[in-house]
Image: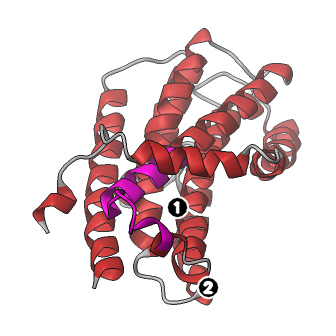
Amino acid sequence: MTSVVVPAWTRRRALALIERNFMIYRRSITPLLNALVEPLLYLLSIGVGVGLLVGTVPGVEVPYAAYVAPAILATTAMNTAFNLTSIGVFTRMRVERTYEAILPTPLSVTDIAVGEVTSAMINALLTSIGFLVIMAIGGLVTSAWVLLALPASLLIAYAFAAGGLAVTTYLRDFPDFQYIQLFMLPMYLFATTFYPLSVYPEAVRPLIQALPLYHSIELVREPALGHLSWHLLIAALYLVAFGSIAMWVATRRMTHAMLR
């Protein structure tokens, strides 16, 4: 069992699974476009619509839409990665039985986990690039440092792709995905996506700051607004730790489930 938890990001065998995934993805750009529809609607309805009522965000002095857009970019990377390693992996594991056909090959369970997470990270990067282009077209880019959102989106995708993979190992059937939404949706709404941390009572703020999406948003929003500080390093380390722990859990549980 110890070989399962050894870091495996350098394993070349995982490239075979990544190639397999993208041979499927390249047949249609529909999944990529679908991943951009929801964040675009949030940007238009809340960022632009509510922004007409809010105007400039106090203390930040940028239009509300420009304040919200980087946070929606972070959630776009989160949702893309998480969905691919939760619904996608669950389908391949329980319905299509894809991994049963893969395991007799030289690929190990760890290779599968690494391949799925890496594939999700690449997809999240593509959707993040697409949303950043939308921000630029909409005049919502206020600093050249917003380009740091792209490496940040990879880190966000790593954390949530690994998290999605770990959560998937606990699911019994498709109705269990409803339980995930009981956590994901409130986190999306309250992790400072649409308003700053200062609006919360002081007693609640530590709970918000403990959320992985809060750190993801900080990692994108602060550079996007031209603010660079050591707090970004804390956010990055949080996501690395979160993703690494989730990856450890996922590989152990996948090995137990597939090789028993």
Q: Which of marks 1 and 2 is nearer the N terminus?
A: 1
Q: In screen coordinates, is 149 left or right of 34?
A: left
Residue type at mark 1: give it. Answer: Thr
Image x and y of residue 129, in percent: 68, 29
Image x and y of residue 135, in percent: 77, 27
Q: Can residue 49 be seen in this view?
A: yes
Name the residue nearer the viewer: 182 or 169.
169
Residue type at mark 2: give it. Answer: Phe
Q: Distance between the residues labelled 1 and 2?
A: 14 Å
- Secondary-structure class at tag 1: helix
Check if residue 113 falls in the magenta segment: yes
Residue in view at x 60 percent, y 51 percent: 21
Residue of label 2: 174
**Residue 168 sits above or below residue 148 on the image:** below
Residue in view at x 88 percent, y 44 percent: 49
Q: Residue furthest top?
A: 144
Q: In screen coordinates, is 132 left or right of 92?
A: right
Residue in view at x 47 percent, y 63 percent: 164
| Residue 85 marker | 1
Magenta highlight range: 101-119
Name the residue nearer the viewer: 132 or 244.
244
